[in-house]
Amino acid sequence: MFCVHTAFIFFLCSSCTSNIIQTPKLETAAGKDLNLTCDHPSLPKSDFIHWYRLSPGQGPVHLIGDYKDTISQDKRKLRLIFSDQRTSSILNILDVTPEDSAVYLCAQGGTKLQIHFLPVQDF
């Protein structure tokens, strides 16, 4: 068994009006499918839901994001599934492995997170 942690971030929109709630922790076995839930009861129709993965020692990595049901374009087998009224969504990870253990972040917004690292000089 291994753990998958989830958290929420809500910094991607200019006028966030949605309260985002995620399941705080899930455990599963290798080879199983995993559903991570993100509740967003007042998500505007034009806003996207994005999922990010945060592994130890790394910055957030954008996994998938859209305003409607979608499947990732890479070989990771990720699906984003919305409820009928867009009040919640699920990140479905197929055939999980121990390497999938991480913190997963759900965010509301119109664009994906852009991370810029600045070089630090040691004097």
Image (spheres, grey):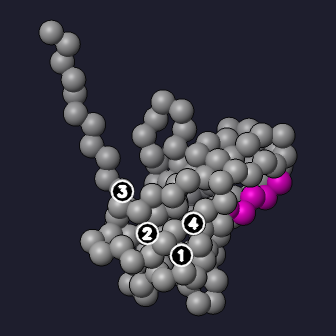
Q: Mark 2 = which residue? A: 108
- Cα separation between marks 1 and 2: 8 Å
Q: Is residue 80 something that shows in the picture?
A: no
The answer to whether the residue labelled 1 contacts the one labelled 4, judged by CB atoms less than 8 Å apart, is: yes
Q: Amino acid at mark 3?
A: Leu
- Cα separation between marks 2 and 4: 11 Å
Between marks 3 and 2 in the image, the one whose residue lies nearer the viewer: 2
Which is nearer the N-term, disc 4 or disc 3? 4
Looking at the image, residue 109 lies above or below residue 9: below
Q: Looking at the rendered structure, which numbered label has been put on residue 113?
A: 3
Q: Is residue 41 left or right of residue 91?
A: left
SS class, disc 4? strand
Q: Quadrant of residue 88?
A: bottom right
- Closer to the camera, 31 or 91? 91
The quarter in which the N terminus is drawn is: top right
- Cα separation between marks 3 and 2: 10 Å
What is the magenta range? 32-36
Q: Quadrant of residue 10?
A: bottom left
Which is nearer the N-term, disc 2 or disc 4? 4
Q: Mark 4 = which residue? A: 21
Is 30 one of the magenta-colored residues?
Answer: no
Categorize mark 4 by other alpha carbons within 10 Å: few (<14), some (14-19), many (20+). some
Q: Mark 1 = which residue? A: 40
x%, y% of residue 25? 70, 51
Q: Amino acid at mark 4?
A: Ile
Looking at the image, residue 26 lies above or below residue 120: below
The answer to whether the residue labelled 1 contacts the one labelled 2, judged by CB atoms less than 8 Å apart, is: yes
SS class, disc 2? strand
Categorize mark 2 by other alpha carbons within 10 Å: few (<14), some (14-19), many (20+). many
SS class, disc 3? loop
Looking at the image, residue 32 lies above or below residue 73: above
